[in-house]
Image (tube, grey):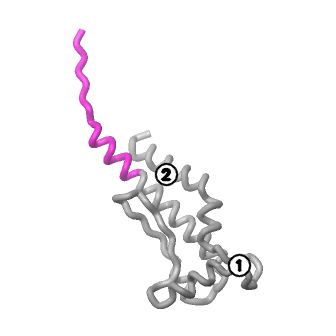
Amino acid sequence: MTVRVTWNGAQVKARERAGAVIGLTQWTEHVAQAAVDVCPIEESTLVGSITPSVDAGSLRGAVCAGDSGSAAYALIQHEALDYHHNAGKTAKYIENPANESKAVGLGLVAAAVKAALGG
C-alpha cells in the first residue's frame, strides 16, 4: 500500500497568522471600547484619541491614547491614581480593561484562528 501526503504547511501557517491578526484586531478594539467607557475625561480629545492597532508582522496589539500634542496629558491621566474622577471613570483606563479582558481576548484569537483554518 502506498500513501501520498501533500504537505501544505506554508498555506496553513499563513491562514493561521491571518486568523490571529483578525482575533488580535477584535481584542484591541474590545479593549479600546472598554477604555473609552472608563476614560476619566469624557468630553475631550483624550477619549477621542484612544486608538487600537495591530502589528501583523510581530502579532502584537496596542491601545494608545493621546496624540503628539497630548501624549503627556494622556499618560498623567492614566497613571495618576490620586485624581478624583466621576463615578465609573478611572485612572488606568487602558491597563485595567486590557488586563480584565485576557480571557475574552484569548477566546477571540482562538476562534478567529479556528475559523481561518476552516474549523
Q: Residue at x 77, y 79 (%)?
A: 87
Residue 9 x/y as whole percent:
29, 38
Foreground residue among 81 and 4? 81
To which residue does mark 1 refer? 81
Viewer-nearest residue: 76 or 17 = 76
- As shown in the figure, which amino acid type bears the numbered disc 2? Val
Label 2: few (<14), some or many (≥20) within 10 Å? many
Nearest to the observer: residue 70 or residue 82:
82
> Of marks 2 and 1, which one's residue comes earlier in the chain?
1
- C-alpha separation, residue under disc 2 versus residue under disc 1: 32 Å
Query: Type of residue at label 1?
Result: Leu
Q: Which residue is mark 2?
A: 109
Q: Nearer the viewer, mark 2 or mark 1?
A: 1
Does residue 18 appear left or right of residue 44 in this picture?
A: left
Q: Quadrant of the N terminus?
A: top left
Label 1, residues with CA under 10 Å away: few <14, some 14-19, many ≥20: few
Region in magenta: 1-19
Q: Position of residue 47 (x, y in %)?
A: 57, 82
Mark 2 residue element: helix
Is 48 contained in the magenta span? Answer: no
The residue at 74%/82% (across/down) is 82
Residue 37 numbered tag: none
| x then y, percent, for residue 30 | 56, 64
Front residue of 95/28: it is 95
Does 9 sit above or below residue 14? Answer: above
In the rendered structure, the answer to whether residue 49 lies left or right of residue 10 reads right
Horizontal relation, residue 75 to residue 6: left or right? right
Q: Position of residue 59 (x, y in %)?
A: 41, 57
Rendered residue at 61%/68% (across/down): 95
